[in-house]
Image (cartoon, rainbow, N blue to C red):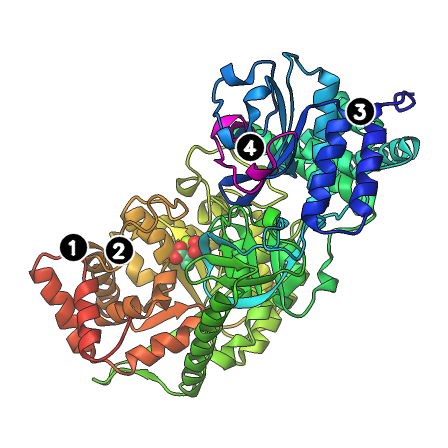
Amino acid sequence: MPYSEAVDSRVLLRRLRDTLAEPGGGQERLDSIVRLIAGGLVADVCSVYLKREEDWLELCATFGLKAEAVHLTRLKVGQGLVGRIADSAEPINTRDAPNTRGFRYMPETGEELFSSFLGVPIQRLGEVLGVLVVQNRDHREYSDDEIYALEVIAMVLAEMAELGAFVGPGAMEIAAQHRLPFFVRGLVGQEGVAEGRVLLHEPQIVVSNPVSDDPAREYARLHAAIERLREEVDEMLAADYLSKAGDHRDVLQAYRMFAHDKGWVRRMEASIESGLAAEVAVEKEQSATRARMSRIADPYIRERLHDLDDLSNRLLRLLAGVDAISGREVPDDAVLVARNIGPAELLDYGRRLKGVVLEEGSVGSHAAIVARALAIPLVIHAERITREAKNGDPILVDGDVGAVHLRPEEGVARAFREKVEMLAGAQQAYAALRDRPATTRDGVTLDLYMNAGLMADLPSLPKCGAAGVGLFRTELQFLIRSTVPKRADLAALYARILDSAGGKPVTFRTLDIGSDKVLPYMKRQDEPNPALGWRAIRVGLDRPGIMRMQVQALLRGAQGRPLRIMFPFVAEAVEFEQGREIIVTEVARERALERPVSTDIKIGAMLETPSLAFASARFFEMVDFVSIGGNDLKQFFFAADRENELVRRRYDALSISYLGFLEGIVARCAAHGTPVSFCGEDAGRPLEALAFAAIGFRQLSMRPASIGPVKALLRQVDLSEARAAIEAARYEAAATARPALEALLGRMGFVV
Ligand code: PEP
Ligand code: MG
């Protein structure tokens, strides 16, 4: 059996563990450890360098170098051999250190006496915490066994650092990772602020005893966990709904491949043989994977390495016997931290979360859609957050600017709380306006509607004082399931939505999928440019089965009540006509079945492509209403991808050209008496809302939280003045009306 051969490192590891268990401060422990390792590996020198600040390594303990150099010798990551090891997360083994590339002479250490050098990173889960070095006087090359032994020791040091073994009362003691404040600026996924405590979606495993006395037992534990892991992957693959091809299946196939990878298993066995606990053996492999991940640019290989990383997490959880946190155990002030999360999982946590921070994600991802629907602040692209955060850590999420403060200093927390209080004060002021109309000083009244996508949104309707739901995105019910929802379930949901709206109008948008919104049970089309591809009404018309079913569910849910339905992404009048024909046919069928059908059904089109603005007059006569989907319309008007961080903020919704284009649409609708509203995100920004009102919009639909700020502003302005400001900007050939409108509000004492 592979673990039966005695390996010296086991004895050394045990001694190390005993030393670490002795009482004493962090420095004392480090001093004993370097002595022990030097003795165990027959080295003249053993030194530990630890990261005391982000980019700096400090000599924290040494046996063999001059004692006065401890806490004096510092190297930047990347500098000298030690810095190179920290940078690359790779060992350096040389018999002639002074003549090795990158060597840097540090006279205070007296290291010129030592020719051979072996250094390995002290790392935990891909995070380099420091460097462990042994040196000898004679010219010798360290053997593979010695390198391996040093790596295993470094692994134990990393685990112990994580447990706080090197923290003590003295000022020069060594702070453990994950105790210092950490700040990261990501991207805004959903605005709002939250203060709470970290809840890791994938809980990390704490290994209290990294060294094992019984390798045979660890070996058996590892193999039992791998067996279970393989079964789990097979079960997932066999699951019915995944039997069709698609992305999920590819990932699972990759999981299966890794789970059966002999090299992976062998390397973990070897770590156990050298005295590590099974969990640490898995983590050692995971560290190596993560170090590779950070060096590889190829997105495909990175994705596969992520798969392997996920698999290691699963294996760790199986070993430790913990499940991923289920939605039921959410503490009161939880801020969820995850690499990524699916819409169904996020919905499971629901409104119990105060905020969400993701390492990945995109503004249009399903998770972002759900966070928006739940009005939970969301920051995406928060680099390294899953590695830095520990369960229960204090965390501040500023979704307005995409900032995250983990373990914040008191001053930061205080400033943050002041901001939260100020916002709460403003919310109270907005609540006082709830039943007042959005009437401007010069007597123009706007109807402010809210956007929604879940039943859970409806309680906001009376709270925010919206005139109704101007856009109900129906795709969430399709995205969060693994199979097509049943017609009866959808009908029941639509009925409850109309019940909750209490007679206020609700505009249902038919399924808007494709592009970034891919249904788990639909074959993914490999499209070169999905945003311009087979999406929304295009899918609905080409595969009318789902559209028909949804229309039936809407008709049945309405139970004879007035109904408003609109089609997303209509580019040509004929698409609207064909969509309307489906509704007309279904209405006739319901009538033939003698089911109650409303006599008041309004059918509209979302104007999200510039082409529809130039449709024939017949279209504007035929359509019952038009709703401008500004998120899409803007991206096509400027040819700037709404998901692409490099360009998505480049063009201004208040640009004179865009406002002129929108004004043309308003005029065309007015000429035919066709009601028009604006329901993209821009409608919820006060300055944009003002500009839209000034160019003639009388209906805006936005997130519930935006209604207060937009109404508060509209009630205090003169639309004619705003119109004049836009006209002046146009006359002066300004690129955008923003400065002119800001100046107008400035004169009125507003800060926007
Ligand atoms: C839009 O495009 O403005 C819109 C409201 O639709 P979505 O954001 O769902 O694409
Ligand atoms: Mg759209």
Magenta segment boundaries in residue numbering: 64-86
Q: CA distance from mark 2 to mark 4?
A: 44 Å
- Going from N to C along the chain, the mark reached first, 1 or 3, is 3
Q: Is residue 126 left or right of residue 229?
A: left
- The residue to which callout 1 is attached is 735
- Would you say residue 53 sits in the magenta stretch? no
Quick check: 548 left or right of 6? left
* Residue at the far left in the pictured view: 732
Q: Are marks 2 and 1 in contact (CB under 8 Å)?
A: yes
Q: Nearer the viewer, mark 2 or mark 4?
A: 4
Residue depth check, mark 2 versus mark 3: number of the one nearer the observer: 3
Residue that appears at 73% across and 33% down? 35
Residue designated by label 3? 270
Viewer can see residue 506? no
Residue designated by label 4: 86
What kind of residue is marked 1? Ala
Query: In the image, is the residue at mark 1 within 8 Å of ligand 1 by its beta carbon?
Result: no
Where, quadrant-wise, is the N terminus in this rendering? top right
Q: Are marks 1 and 3 in contact (CB under 8 Å)?
A: no
Give the foreground label among 1 and 3: 3
As measured in the structure, the alpha-carbon distance from the residue carrying label 2 to the one carrying label 3 is: 59 Å
Question: Counting residues from the N terminus, which is met first, the one under dot 3 or under dot 4?
Answer: 4
- Element at badge 2? loop
Q: Nearer the viewer, mark 4 or mark 1?
A: 4
Check disc 1: other Cα within 10 Å, few if <14, some if 14-19, many if 20+: some
Residue under circle 2?
652
Q: Is residue 155 above or below residue 422?
A: above
